[in-house]
């Protein structure tokens, strides 16, 4: 019964994570991507804080927040810019390639050794991203592809740098603190620079989408992911990210009417295959 519940948690996580690019696409051009990302992590961080059962030592707060900024400010803002300047399916596939970069950074920064199979997977992953980029179609742009890759690279760096704190406190606590605190720093920074643009004419539907991104995608989905991890373990739970490009692409094709080129599909297939190695 516990495993069934864990897989239900994973299904909720998969559907939520796969909806980010598709559901936020209609707001691009109407809502500032910087505000959207900061607000999303503020709401999500507040929700996750309700489920934390342990405090973080004062000496660890600053590094956790700084590393959190790499995720909430750089990576997830880059994701929204990728959505803005390219198709939602393109952004989803590129950001889901982050495990390739995690392996690459872990090799040099954590001295993690991989078997030959994993090295081949990393090389194939880079090849797949290159092929995928060449398959850009109407709605894609080089700027969007750049931001999608930047999002994957910086999220991978965030993952590697946060590893020791995840091990010390657990991923739920670290994610809660890093999300909430980094979002507050983000909002203050935007306000200080005069770049805090609160949308005023998006209506109830627009605000519903923004709140959904905060409550469901950044709050509930992270919580269900960590709950599933308690039963299934990190390795098995993380496999849902292999499915994100497929599910997000299906969402984009059916809800946004996006199309796919043959070259793009080949690149996606190579990337997905590399993630299984």
Image (spheres, helix red, strand yellow):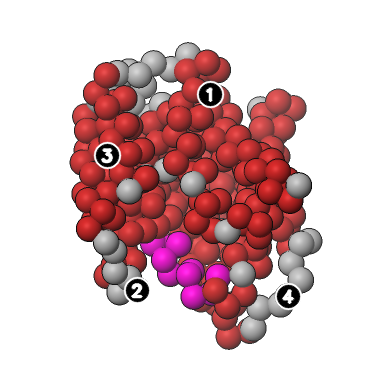
In which quadrant of the rendered view does residue 126 lie? top left
| Residue underneath mark 4 | 54
Q: Is residue 18 above or below residue 157?
A: above
The first of marks 3 and 1 along the sequence is: 3
User: Mark 4 near mark 2, Cβ–Cβ under 8 Å?
Assistant: no
Q: Is residue 159 magenta?
A: yes
Circle 2: element type: loop
Left or right of 86 in this view: 113: left
User: Mark 3 near mark 1, Cβ–Cβ under 8 Å?
Assistant: no
| Residue underneath mark 3 | 129
| Residue underneath mark 1 | 251
Query: x, y percentage for residue 184?
Result: 63, 61
Residue at mark 2 to residue at mark 3: CA–CA distance:
24 Å
Q: Which mark is residue 29?
A: none
The first of marks 1 and 4 along the sequence is: 4
Query: x, y percentage for residue 225?
Result: 63, 51
* Residue at screen point 60% across, 35% down: 15
Other residues around mark 3 within 10 Å, as few (<14) / some (14–19) / many (≥20) = many
Other residues around mark 2 within 10 Å, as few (<14) / some (14–19) / many (≥20) = few
In which quadrant of the rendered view does residue 168 lie? bottom right
Magenta stretch: dominant secondary structure: helix
* Residue at screen point 30% across, 74% down: 111
**Camera-side residue of 117 and 210:** 117
Residue at mark 4 to residue at mark 2: CA–CA distance:
27 Å
Circle 1: element type: helix
Magenta part of the chain: 157-166
Circle 4: element type: loop
Q: Is residue 247 magenta?
A: no
In which quadrant of the rendered view does residue 109 lie? bottom left
**Camera-side residue of 199 and 166:** 166
């Amino acid at each position: 019964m516990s495993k069934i519940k864990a897989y239900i948690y994973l299904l909720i996580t998969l559907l939520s994570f796969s909806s980010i690019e598709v559901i936020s696409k209609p707001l691009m051009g109407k809502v500032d991507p910087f505000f959207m990302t900061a607000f999303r992590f503020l709401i999500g961080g507040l929700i996750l804080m309700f489920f934390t059962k342990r405090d973080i030592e004062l000496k660890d707060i600053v590094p956790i927040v700084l590393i959190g900024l790499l995720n909430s400010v750089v990576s997830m803002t880059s994701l929204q810019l990728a959505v803005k300047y390219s198709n939602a399916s393109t952004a989803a596939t590129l950001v889901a390639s982050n495990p390739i970069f995690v392996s690459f950074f872990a090799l040099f920064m954590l001295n993690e050794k991989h078997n030959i199979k994993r090295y081949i997977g990393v090389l194939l992953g880079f090849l797949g991203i290159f092929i995928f980029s060449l398959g850009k179609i109407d709605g894609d742009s080089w700027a969007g592809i750049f931001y999608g890759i930047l999002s994957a690279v910086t999220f991978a760096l965030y993952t590697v740098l946060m590893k020791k704190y995840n091990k010390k406190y657990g991923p739920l606590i670290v994610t809660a603190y890093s999300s909430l605190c980094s979002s507050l720093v983000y909002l203050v920074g935007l306000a200080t620079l005069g770049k805090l643009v609160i949308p005023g004419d998006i209506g109830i539907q627009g605000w519903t989408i923004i709140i959904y991104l905060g409550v469901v995608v950044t709050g509930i989905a992270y919580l269900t992911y960590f709950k599933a991890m308690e039963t299934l373990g990190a390795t098995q739970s993380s496999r849902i990210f292999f499915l994100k490009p497929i599910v997000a692409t299906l969402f984009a094709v059916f809800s946004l009417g996006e199309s796919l080129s043959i070259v793009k599909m080949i690149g996606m297939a190579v990337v997905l295959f590399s993630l299984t190695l």
